[in-house]
Amino acid sequence: MVIRSSMRGTGAVAIALSIAIGVASAQAPAVNPNQAAQAAAEQKQRIDQPLNNQPVWKEVRSGEQQTTNVRGRETNVLIQSEGQTWRAIRVPIATAGGWLIALAVLVVLGYYAWRGPMEVRDRPTGRMIERFTAVKRASHWAMALSFVALAVSGLVTTFGKAVLLPLIGYTLFSWLATISMLVHNFTGPLFAVAVPVFIVLFVRDNLPKAYDVQWLAKFGGMLDRSGAMHLPSGKFNAGEKVQFWLMVCVLSVVLIVTGLILDFPNFGQTRATMQLANVIHMVAGLLGV
């Protein structure tokens, strides 16, 4: 009887252990073959090359999405390597734009030195003619003043560290840079409203005409130092029309779109989108200035 009871107890224990092992096996997560192979490779690498963290940082800089408890766009990407590319290309673009602006200033000064002031040939009659309505004048000045504020603050932001900082020092430049950033950010939405209104009001008078070809062929008579050449131009000459379509309708619209992307980063833009918008914004701004 004692032997039989002992055997029964041993059998019960064996059955209980078998059930426990089965439950534990069922609850254990399945092993991913790829993860197991990667773990084995990492373990081997630690033995063969101790203190070598190159594979770890290579994976970190790969930009691959990992696991995080923080929700949001790209919160599971620790390092975005494209940011280094963005920082590297901004300097040559800004340098080229700076030289382009300097060249444009020299060309204007050279032309003025060669041509001289353009004076009125006859005495004023005193008769006043309304060329633009009050609405058009207000639209023009709203766009012009906001553009000047954006241009000056943008130039300070782009070239201030290289040009102004050595001249005025850290304290004054820090104030100037902060003010420029605030002016740029808060004037941008005003410019975004003024430009479409300006386009609607002035697009009709800036449509191309047949006589614009003659104006362009002779450069509007601007190379005639006597000032006697007069070419048909309508309300706006061909040069003003080119500036309207290129500067207002193309570059300004590009500046508005990219500026809004940069000004309001809370709409789910990724870092790559912001970096691309920044580069396009810089190029369009330098060309516009």
Image: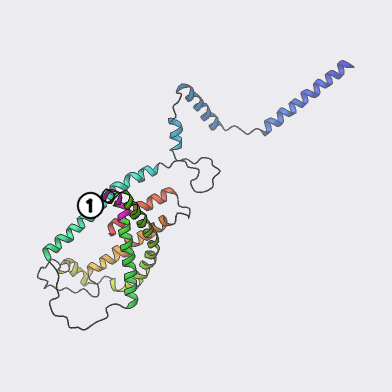
Left or right relative to 273: residue 251: left
Q: Which residues are magenta?
A: 155-167
Residue at horizontal 32 percent and vertical 70 percent from the top: 141
Q: Residue 182, position in %: x, y?
A: 38, 58
Q: Residue 246, position in %: x, y?
A: 29, 63
Q: Most extreme residue toward the front, as rendered?
A: 171
Q: Pointer 1: what residue?
A: 99
Residue at horizontal 30 percent and vertical 59 percent from the top: 152
Of the pair 225 and 25, the residue shown nearer to us: 225
Q: Residue 173, position in %: x, y?
A: 32, 52
| Residue 161 lies in the magenta-colored region | yes
Q: Is residue 258 above or below residue 40?
A: below
Residue at horizontal 68 percent and vertical 33 percent from the top: 26
Of the pair 113 and 67, the residue shown nearer to us: 113
Q: Residues within 10 Å of mark 1 (few under 14, many from 20)?
A: few
Query: Which three-letter amino acid code belongs to the residue tagged 1?
Result: Trp
Q: Most extreme residue toward the right, as rendered?
A: 1
| Residue 119 lies in the magenta-colored region | no
Of the pair 97 and 142, the residue shown nearer to us: 142
* Residue 191 occupies quadrant: bottom left
Residue at horizontal 45 percent and vertical 49 percent from the top: 270
